[in-house]
Image (cartoon, rainbow, N blue to C red):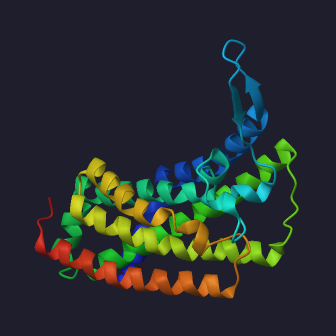
Amino acid sequence: MIKSMLNTDFLRVFTMPLVYIMAAVSLIMPVLIIVMTTMMAGTTVDPITGAETTVESFTNVWQSVAAVSGDSSSAAMDIVSMCNINLVYILAAVFVCIFIAGDFTSGYAKNIFTVRPYRYDYVISKTVIGFAGGAIMLVCYFIGAMAGGAIAGLSFDAEEAGAFGIVMCMLSKIFLMLVFVSIYTVMGAVAKQRLWLSVLLSLGASMLLFTMIPMITPLDSNFLNVLMCFIGGALFAAGLGAVSCVILKKTGIV
């Protein structure tokens, strides 16, 4: 039953414009961020007050992906540290919430739960779909960052991170997506057809973990980071998946 549910959902999601729109946004966003911040970078002086305003910019293309562990800039609250690939976790919330809310709005969920008495196959399917969509968006952002860095003329020197660290960093971020998708699935189950509520709940809950992403998935990640994100994602998927099943079982379809 789980296999048939997955096949149906994969067919649905890849025949809908949603996943392609989110992938396009993930691809274009880093290009605009890198190019615009590079163009606006520098210090300006107010001729009246004499106050100086400094606009930070990326000095290395890999800053748009992650910071090296121990780098003080990773804890800073500036445009360079905030506008990076971690924004995709927010886009994933919108993707998952729209997909789940659409099931309840269209009546698809009601039909599914009438035919299938168990909720776990629905939750597993949505979690897998959300994870796949989030992984696609992360890869698209990475490609866009490379393109934006090339256009802006930024350095591609990975320095101490190296190619291995970058690959491990991306794998860590992909596996970490499962943690966030599990949270979004729970919130989708709570809000059902109320898309606005599921998005607000998802963003509010994920903000509690958002600041931990740079520490868990630095640019110089290794096998330990990947393993930690994989185990964490599996535990969250199992635990929060069970919570989603209980919510769907104990509450009404609408």
Locate residue 130: give its quadrant.
Answer: bottom left
- Asked if residue 56 can be seen in this view, the reply is yes
Quadrant position of the N terminus in the picture: bottom left
Q: Indicate whether 199 appears above or below 49.
A: below
Query: Residue placed at 53% from the left, 74% from the top?
Result: 176
Query: Residue placed at 66% from the left, 63% from the top?
Result: 139
- Give the left or right position of residue 186, taking residue 182 as reference: left
Q: Indicate whether 153 appears above or below 136.
A: above
Query: Residue placed at 35% from the left, 57% from the top?
Result: 204
Between 1 and 146, the residue placed more toward the observer is 146
Quadrant position of the C terminus in the picture: bottom left
Q: x and y percent of residue 57 in the render?
A: 74, 43
Q: x and y percent of residue 215 in the render?
A: 59, 71
Q: x and y percent of residue 138 in the render?
A: 61, 62
Between 223 and 78, the residue placed more toward the observer is 78
**Residue found farthest to the top:** 48
Q: x and y percent of residue 45 in the render?
A: 74, 22
